[in-house]
Image: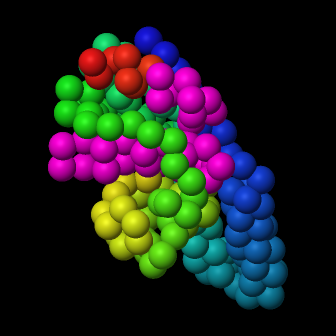
Amino acid sequence: MTFYTAAWNAGVWAWTIGALAIVAVAYVAVGLSRSGAAWGWGALVFLALLMPLLFAPVKLQVEGSTFKVQMVAFSTRYDLEKLQSVTRVSQDEVFGGGTFRTFASGGLFGYYGLFRGGPLKSFTAYVTDGRKLVLLKFLGKTVVVSPSDPDGLVKALSSASH
């Protein structure tokens, strides 16, 4: 069993702290200037902003013939018997040329979810550091991850899938 963390890079930290700070300041400002109901609505907005955190990737795991992506509150598994290729890629190779989110977070707690367009056409991303990208092509599914040790993950997945 091999573990890799999904550590946030400086951009994800800045985006997340900035967004949360703006909402927190707005929450306090509106709450102080209005009635008690404003505090309740502000709390709802703040909680809605925290919902994507439940899906933020925190750990990647290779165990036998399974690749597991552990998120804060959930996990998903991929069958390595269906893995066709695993390679290091650049940020431009993944997110360049017209890539857009279809159901994804675009910086708040990371870049994860479903994306379309660009070089990969359609893919699922679990990215917290755009400098450490690994592309996994499964039968019928393309996945991009950003492990703490990209070369180690490529080696572990190559060994496990053969």
Where residue 33 sits: x, y (%)?
80, 87
Locate the N terminus by quadrant: top left
Going 41% across and 58% down the picture, which residue do you hit? 113
Locate the C terminus by quadrant: top left
Q: In this view of the protein, which residue sits in the foreground, 20 or 153?
A: 153
Residue 84 lies left or right of residue 3; in this view the side is left
Residue 44 lies left or right of residue 104; in this view the side is right
- Residue furthest to the bottom: 34
Please give the count of numbered marks on the rendered protein.
0
> In which quarter of the view is residue 148 placed?
top right
Q: How is the image coloured?
A: rainbow
Going 55% across and 63% down the picture, which residue do you hit? 92
Q: Is 118 in the magenta? A: no
Residue 65 lies left or right of residue 86; in this view the side is left
Going 20% across and 33% down the picture, which residue do you hit? 82
115 versus 42 height, above or below: above
Q: In this view of the protein, which residue sits in the foreground, 118 or 143?
A: 118
Where residue 52 sits: x, y (%)?
50, 57
147 versus 107 height, above or below: above
Where residue 63 sits: x, y (%)?
37, 16
7 versus 56 height, above or below: above
Residue extent of the magenta highlight? 126-155
Residue 88 lies left or right of residue 40; in this view the side is left
Q: In this view of the protein, which residue sits in the foreground, 29 or 35?
A: 29
Q: Is 133 in the magenta? A: yes
Going 44% across and 40% down the picture, which residue do you hit? 87
> In which quarter of the view is residue 117 placed?
bottom left
Where residue 74 sits: x, y (%)?
40, 39
Q: Does residue 99 appear anywhere in the picture?
A: yes
Q: Does residue 48 appear anywhere in the picture?
A: no
